Image: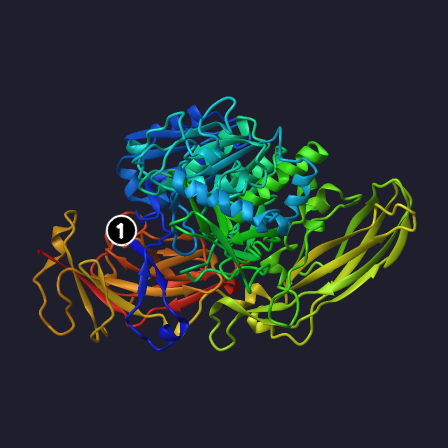
Amino acid sequence: MVRFQSLAVSAAALLAGVPALAIAQDGFDPENFDKFVPNTYIVELEDGQAHESYLDALKDESGVDGVTQRFAYGPLFNAVSFEVEGSLTTEPEKLRRRLAELPGYKHIWPVEIIQAPKVVGDLDIFTMDSTKASGAEKSRRQNGDFVFPPHEMIQADRLHAEGYTGNGTRIGVIDSGFDYLHPALGGCYGPGCLIEYGYDLVGEDFNGSPGTLRPDDDPFATCDIHGTLVTGTIAAQENPLGFTGVAPGVKIGAYRVFSCAGASSSDVIIAAIFRAYEDGSDVITLSVGDYSGYTAHPLSVALSRVVEAGVPCVAAAGNSAGNHYGVWSVVAPASGEGVMAVGAVESTLRPSINSETGQVSWAANPAGGLVTGFSLWGPTFEGDFKPQFTAPGGNILTVAPNNGYTVTSGTSFAAPITAASIALLIEARGKLSPSEVRSLLATTAKRIDSGSGLGLEPVAHQGAGIIQVHDAVHATTSVSAEGFAVGDTEHHVADNEFEVVNDSGEAIDYEISHIAALAAEVLWEENGFRLNDPDLVPGAATVKIEPTSFTLQPGAATTVRFSVDQPTGLNAIRLPLYGGFVAIEGSSSASNATAAQSFSVPYQGIAGVVREAGVLAFPEQFFFLRFDNGVENWSPLPPNVIFQLPVPAAHPEWAKPVGTTESHLPLGSLPGWTYWAKIGSPEIRFELVPVTPSCQFPDLPLSTNVMGDETMPINASPQRLVNPNGKFFSWSGRLAGGVWTPPGRYIMRLYALRHFGNPDSVEDWEVLDYKPNFALSYVNP
């Protein structure tokens, strides 16, 4: 077995070879039980293929003793999740091949363990009682006509003044448990209540294994507060602290997908997505997910299917706090096609609650209105435009379980604020398609300054800007765009177009111009490390627009074409992300002039060739290490190192006496390696290369790979959809086929496929040999 861990370490420390590393569990290999549910898969089937017949065929396979179905999905996503038992599970790649050969197979993913989302920073929860409620009410009266800052920032307060509350809209919220007994969340559950429908898909003790699932129809829980916090931002009712949710008139569907242990799994969350859809949710929002950056992640694929079916879906872009995530790290399912990935901006005022009196005070926030430092960046690894836009997510006042209130931060709150804004939009304008919602919110969003004095925040961080829902509701011009991804240098999309339609009752004059945003230099030139907080530099593309001005009569339309030439003067080695906005200014000479409005269409691109940038950072710093009884040991390895492993029961003939030379490591030491994927990889393989004739056993499972090398893949190989982060891992001696590696001396070789690379092309793989080579010897303990 292989166990992976994330390598959360500063670049300076890694370059200096400092052994003291801060480590967090974050593996991603199917054999890593901390990240994936053992022997459990999601298989998507061809349309019309029955789940039962596929599973029945699997049960007949040699080496399969049993198959337990977990979830069946459909019709939007004809897939099934299941656990496999039997000897074939010791050969995961062989099992995957068998699954792919069965009739009706379309795609496969291992089932992941998904950890419960965390807020940014610490939480102080204030519990309301009658005495404190009196103080809070006094504070609210003193504040008079004070406007709740998050609502003012997105213009929700202006829609409230016009009578819009989201009435008639159902929002499905997929999160942890929900305290619907909270007075500000209605105090009840079921028909007629604020939280009207939903489901608990996990129960109290779920840890990923099927035997711990305890679903029921009651989503109540207070052991995890996240779902309650999120729901408060959407629909909190009037309360002593004097605020409400963005859409207090909606009905909430509460779908609990995290147990009290803080665990869920990808197949559980997918089940919740489709249950929310089937229950008639008009909007679905998730502030959960997995650091990914790939549209091909199963959570992203599932949520995209709901979008295709006509339901607007919103997801948090994700937080980088405490991790080396940032650019290209939008979480799944926010990375899905058509899914609205939402970043976070700081509230203009910082609230604090007096724990003695219950009074709320507000202080100026110097970073108010800027994109938060923790909000993750786009684009996706496939080059898709992300995030779509931003909303308030820093210093948000909301409700907490057990009649509590708190101030919290995270993109977890920007997403539900956006979902609630969509409810206001639907109430005012009627049913809208997902593309209409995305277009209205994106083209009416307000561009965000970087706060650096250099220009606008990069589009890959702010998306279209902060949503302005009042402008979206009252827009009298339609713009058939939401954002353009113009690609990297190798896949550059120079020519783009969108349509402008005058929906008003009067003629409108339009002026079209280009507004550049700052570029973000992603990589260090010296070693290629991916910056979590990239350097912002001026880097304007040359944009040609046709036409630059025109007049449209009521109901008329025209096509605006614009071409983008990449910026000059940027360092392509650093893969700069550039972008900007095609601004549309509408004006009218009519006496009432109600149709005058501003719009903009964002675009983002990469001024470099992603494929040529490669995968691996610090290749000269990748090194061999040892694990002693499961604990990493960063001491230098002796020359000609020999690892002594317990002799496998299947091969007693390999047993040798315990070695005692300086080259022999003690029993309990396992080989291990480090690597850092600076911008991730579609596929990384670890394969052994024999270096001595003693390795040439008659049954040595050598195979020739695309590079022409005769190797033996280890049991963790391949890894797919690898995210950008540092990893280190230990290895117990098993190969991909489940067999043990024969004794002998080997080189561990890493193969990493470049983004946009062809897996059948030698040139598109990076190859690294770890040093020193090592020997395996098997002994009787």
Q: In this view, does 586 lie to the left or right of 454?
A: right
Q: In this view, does 746 lie to the left or right of 247?
A: left
Q: How far across and how far down the image is residue 383, in percent? A: 60, 55
| Vertical position of residue 238 compared to residue 482: above or below | above
Give the residue type that dot 1 points to.
Met
Q: Give the secondary structure at mark 1.
A: loop
Q: How far across and how far down the image is residue 46, in percent? A: 53, 32
Q: Which of 38 and 207 is in front in this view?
A: 207
Q: Is residue 667 left or right of residue 202?
A: left
Residue receiving disc 1: 1
> Coloured how?
rainbow
Q: Is residue 390 left or right of residue 68?
A: right
Q: Which of 236 and 319 is in front in this view?
A: 236
Residue 344 position by quadrant: bottom right
Q: Nearer the viewer, residue 236 or 32?
A: 236
Is residue 203 visible in this depiction of the protein? yes
Q: How far across and how far down the image is residue 775, in percent? A: 22, 66
**Residue drawn at (91%, 44%) of the image:** 553
**Residue drawn at (47%, 53%) of the image:** 409
Q: How crowded is mark 1: few (under 14 residues within 10 Å), some or many (20 or more)?
A: some
